[in-house]
C-alpha cells in the first residue's frame, strides 16, 4: 500500500494552516503513487465531526480521530504508531511547526522509519516519494530517499501550499489508543500564551525588524524611531531571540513560530538571518539588512546589505528619512 | 539526581561548510569546536546543581563522534561536567538523525540518567530532533526548545514557544529536554578548569559495549539515504555597502529606497 498519513494540528476549533498544506501535499503525492491520503487528529471534545470531515475538502479521504491531550507530541506518536501498525501507511507527512518535528522524530524512533526535516519539496519517483531539503544554510539541496517501511517527511514552514478547498467530506474513524506511560508523564499547563503587547505587524507595508544586535531591550527605541520616520503603514518586528529574552512582544515575532509577513520593505537591524527567521519574511518585496558581520547569512538573501554598526546607522537613517519626508 | 548532557563536536562557525563530493557527507575537516548550542545545556545542568532545589550528584557529558570529538568532551568538562562518555565506532559513521538518536540512547541507557539535556540544534546537522528520537528509545517524556526550566517537586516546569504562543508544560522525571539558546548565558571556563579537564574520567565506548545493533546504524543502517546534492535556484546577489562613512552610507540607503518608491 502507498497511503500517506498526515498530522492535522488544530487549535481553538480550526486546523493549522501548515497542517492543511500538508494534507493537500499528501493528497497530491499519494495520488501519484497510487494511494490515499489520511489524517490523524488528536484532541478532546473540540473535535467535532464536521471539523474532522472538513479535511476531506483538502484531499484526505479518511480521518483517524483519537481522544487525547492537545498540544503535546508524544501522545500523537502513540496514535500514529497504532494507526500505521493497523493500516500500513508508507509515508507520514508533517507541515512545518514545532510539534511536527517532535512527532516525526519520535515516530522514526518508534517504527524504525527514516526521517527528513525542513523539507521544501516532495515528489513522486515511480512508486516512491523523495524529499528535498536545503542544507548548509540553504546553499545546497539534498535529496532524501527512504529505505524500509516508513518514510517520514517534516516540511519547512509554509513549504506546502493549500489548494482551493472543495470535494467530498472525509470519513471519520474513531480510534481508541492506549497511550504509552511516558506520554502520560507530560501535562500541558497553559497553551498559546501571548506575551507582551498585541501589535499588528501583518498589516504593515514597511517593517523595521530588530534582533539581538540591538544589544538590549532599550535598543528597540532606535527601531521604533526609524519606523516612525517612515510614517503610517510601518511597524517594528522582532526575532525569537529577542522575544524569548523579553525585549519585545511575541505578537511582533517573525518566523517559524511567529508570523509570516511579506511587506513592501523589510529592514533588518542586528539580525543574523537564521533559517527559522528567514522562512517568515523571505517573500518580502525589498529586503535591507544592517549587520556588522560581513558573513552574516542575512546578506545571502538581502537586496541591499549594509556592513556596519547599527548604533551609528539607525539614528542617522531615521533623521535622513524624516528630513526627506518633511522636505 | 544524575544529569547527562549530550554534546557534539561541530565545524567552527568560521569554517565554510561544504559537502565532500567523494563521500557525499559533510566535509568535517578544519577547525572544530563544541556545538555552541550545547553550552546552554551544560549551563542549564550547572544552574540546576547550583540552584539547590534538587541534589545533582553528577553531570556526565556524552558524545557520539570520531576520535577528535574527545575535545568537545574536554570543553564540556571545563564548563562543569564531572566526567564524560565517548561513543565512537567506525560502524556509526554516516548515521542519520534516527540512527544517531538510537545509538545515543543505547549509550545513555548504561548511565540511567534522571535527566538528559541537549542543545536546540547542532550547528552542522541542524535536525532539531535528536532529543525526540532519544526520548522515545528511552521511553521518557520530552520537550524541545525549552527556554525556562524550573524544578517542581518530582517534576520540571518548562516553558517554550510553540505554534500558538508560549506553552507551559509539566513533565515528571526522568525526562529528555532540549534547551533553546535563550534559556541562559553560558559561563566561560576558568583557566584552571580548562587545564584540569583532561584529568577528569572519560569512558570510551564502542558499538558493542553500548549494545548497539550495528544493522541499525551507520550509512548502511540508516533509513534515509541523502544524496543528489544540487544548487538551489540562483538568486541575483544583492548590493553590499561597507559603512566607512555613515553620512555617505545613509545617503546611499535613502537613494536606494527612493528609487524603489519606498519613501
Ligand atoms: C524550532 C525553532 C524555531 C524558531 N523559530 C524562530 C522564529 O519564529 N523567529 C525567529 O526569528 N527565530 C526563530 N528561531 C531562532 C533562530 O534560529 C535564531 O536563533 C534567531 O532568529 C536569531 O535571532 P537574532 O538574529 O536576533 O540573533 P543572532 O543570531 O544572535 O544575531 C544577531 C546579529 O546581530 C549582529 N550584530 C550584533 N551587534 C551589532 C551591531 N552593533 N550592529 C550591527 N549588527 C550587529 C550580529 O553580527 C548577528 O548577526 C527558531 C529556532 C528553532 C530551532
Ligand atoms: N553525535 C552527537 N553526539 C552527542 N549529542 C548529539 C549528537 N548529535 C546531536 N546531539 C545533540 O542533539 C542536539 C540537537 O542536534 P540536532 O538534532 O542534530 O540538531 C545537539 O545540540 C546535541 O546536544
Image (cartoon, helix red, strand yellow):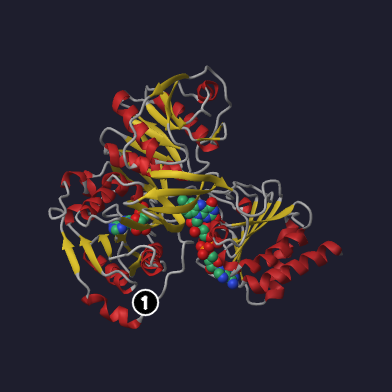
Residue name at image x 38 percent, y 24 percent: A175
Would you identify the image quadrant in which residue A245 lies? bottom right
* Numbered disc total: 1
Residue B182 can be seen in this image: yes
**Quarter of the figure with the N terminus of chain A:** top left
Say if disc 1 is inside 8 Å of ligand 2.
no
User: Taking B234 as reference, is B104 left or right?
Assistant: left
Q: Vertically, is A80 above or below A280? A: above
Residue B19 can be seen in this image: no
Residue name at image x 35 percent, y 62 percent: B54
Would you identify the image quadrant in which residue A66 lies? top left
Q: Position of residue B16 (x, y in %)?
A: 40, 64
Q: Vertically, is B101 above or below A104? A: below
Please state which of residues B105 and A193 is positioned toward the viewer in this rendering.
Answer: A193
Please state which of residues A10 and A203 is positioned toward the viewer in this rendering.
Answer: A10
**Quarter of the figure with the C terminus of chain A:** bottom right
Would you identify the image quadrant in which residue B118 lies? bottom left
Q: Position of residue A292 (x, y in %)?
A: 56, 70
Please state which of residues A106 and B67 is positioned toward the viewer in this rendering.
Answer: A106
Looking at the rendered structure, the secondary structure element under dot 1 is loop
Q: The disc numbered 1 marks a residue on which chain?
A: B
Q: Report the residue that reaches farthest toward the front.
A: B153
Q: Position of residue A304 (x, y in %)?
A: 62, 61
Residue name at image x 40 percent, y 62 percent: B37
Residue name at image x 57 percent, y 25 percent: A165
Q: Vertically, is B195 above or below B184? A: below
Q: Vertically, is B60 above or below B131? A: below
User: Taking B246 as reference, is A243 left or right?
Assistant: left
User: Taking B125 as reference, is B260 left or right?
Assistant: right
State the residue position of label 1. B189
- Ligand 2 falls in which quarter? bottom left
Amino acid at each position: 500500500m502507498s497511503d500517506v498519513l498526515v498530522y492535522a494540528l488544530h487549535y481553538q476549533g480550526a486546523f493549522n494552516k501548515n497542517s492543511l498544506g500538508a494534507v493537500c501535499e499528501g493528497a497530491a503525492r499519494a495520488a501519484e503513487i497510487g494511494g490515499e491520503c489520511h489524517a490523524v487528529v488528536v484532541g478532546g471534545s473540540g473535535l467535532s465531526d464536521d471539523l474532522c470531515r472538513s479535511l476531506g475538502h483538502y484531499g484526505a479521504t479518511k480521518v483517524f480521530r483519537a481522544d487525547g491531550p492537545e498540544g503535546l507530541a508524544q501522545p500523537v506518536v502513540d496514535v500514529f504508531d497504532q494507526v500505521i501498525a493497523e493500516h500500513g501507511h508508507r509515508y507520514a507527512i508533517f507541515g512545518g511547526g514545532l510539534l511536527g518535528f517532535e512527532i516525526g522524530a519520535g515516530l522514526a524512533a518508534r517504527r524504525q522509519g527514516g526521517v527528513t526535516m525542513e523539507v521544501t519539496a516532495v515528489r513522486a519517483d515511480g512508486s516512491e516519494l523523495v524529499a528535498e531539503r536545503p542544507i548548509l544554510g540553504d546553499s545546497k539541496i539534498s535529496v532524501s530517499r527512504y529505505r524500509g517501511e516508513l518514510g517520514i517527511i517534516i516540511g519547512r514552514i509554509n513549504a506546502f501550499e493549500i489548494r482551493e478547498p472543495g470535494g467530498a467530506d472525509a470519513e471519520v474513524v474513531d480510534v481508541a489508543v492506549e497511550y504509552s506511560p511516558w506520554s502520560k508523564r507530560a501535562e500541558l499547563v497553559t497553551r498559546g500564551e501571548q506575551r507582551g503587547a498585541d501589535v499588528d505587524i501583518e498589516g504593515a507595508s514597511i517593517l523595521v525588524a530588530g534582533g539581538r544586535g540591538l544589544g538590549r531591550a532599550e535598543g528597540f527605541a532606535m527601531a521604533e524611531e526609524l519606523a516612525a520616520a517612515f510614517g503610517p503603514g510601518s511597524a517594528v518586528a522582532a526575532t525569537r531571540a529577542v522575544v524569548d529574552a523579553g525585549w519585545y512582544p511575541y505578537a511582533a515575532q517573525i518566523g517559524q513560530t511567529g508570523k509570516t509577513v511579506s511587506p513592501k520593505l523589510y529592514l533588518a537591524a542586528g539580525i543574523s538571518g537564521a533559517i527559522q527567521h528567514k522562512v517568515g519574511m523571505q517573500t518580502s518585496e525589498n529586503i535591507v539588512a544592517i549587520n556588522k558581520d560581513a558573513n552574516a547569512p542575512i546578506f545571502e538573501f538581502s537586496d541591499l546589505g549594509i556592513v556596519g554598526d547599527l548604533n551609528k546607522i539607525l539614528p542617522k537613517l531615521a533623521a535622513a528619512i524624516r528630513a526627506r519626508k518633511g522636505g | 539526581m544524575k544529569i547527562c548532557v549530550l554534546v557534539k563536536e561541530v565545524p567552527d562557525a568560521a569554517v565554510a561548510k561544504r559537502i565532500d563530493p567523494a563521500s557525499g557527507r559533510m566535509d568535517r575537516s578544519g577547525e572544530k569546536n563544541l556545538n555552541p548550542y550545547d553550552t546552554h545545556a551544560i549551563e542549564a545542568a550547572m544552574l540546576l546543581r547550583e540552584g539547590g532545589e534538587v541534589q545533582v550528584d553528577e553531570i556526565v557529558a556524552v558524545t557520539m563522534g570520531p576520535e577528535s570529538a574527545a575535545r568537545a568532551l574536554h570543553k564540556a568538562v571545563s564548563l562543569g561536567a564531572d566526567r564524560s562518555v565517548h561513543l565512537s565506532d567506525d560502524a556509526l559513521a554516516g548515521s542519520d538523525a534516527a540512527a544517531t538518536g538510537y545509538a545515543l540512547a543505547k549509550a545513555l541507557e548504561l548511565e540511567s540518567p534522571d535527566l538528559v539535556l541537549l542543545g536546540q540544534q547542532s550547528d552542522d546537522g541542524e535536525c532539531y530532533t535528536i532529543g525526540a528520537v532519544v526520548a522515545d528509545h528511552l521511553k521518557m517524556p520530552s520537550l524541545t526548545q525549552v527556554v525556562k526550566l524550573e524544578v517542581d517537586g518530582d517534576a520540571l516546569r518548562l516553558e517554550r514557544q510553540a505554534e500558538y504562543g508560549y506553552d507551559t508544560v509539566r513533565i515528571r522525571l526522568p525526562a529528555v529536554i532540549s534547551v533553546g539558546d535563550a534559556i541562559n548565558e553560558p559561563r566561560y571556563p576558568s583557566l584552571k578548569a580548562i587545564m584540569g579537564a583532561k584529568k577528569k574520567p572519560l569512558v570510551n565506548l564502542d558499538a558493542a559495549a553500548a549494545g548497539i545493533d550495528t544493522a541499525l546504524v551507520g550509512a548502511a543502517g540508516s533509513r534515509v539515504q541523502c544524496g543528489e546534492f544540487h544548487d538551489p535556484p540562483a538568486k541575483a546577489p544583492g548590493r553590499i555597502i561597507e559603512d566607512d562613512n555613515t553620512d555617505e552610507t545613509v545617503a546611499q540607503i535613502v537613494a536606494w529606497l527612493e528609487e524603489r518608491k519606498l519613501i
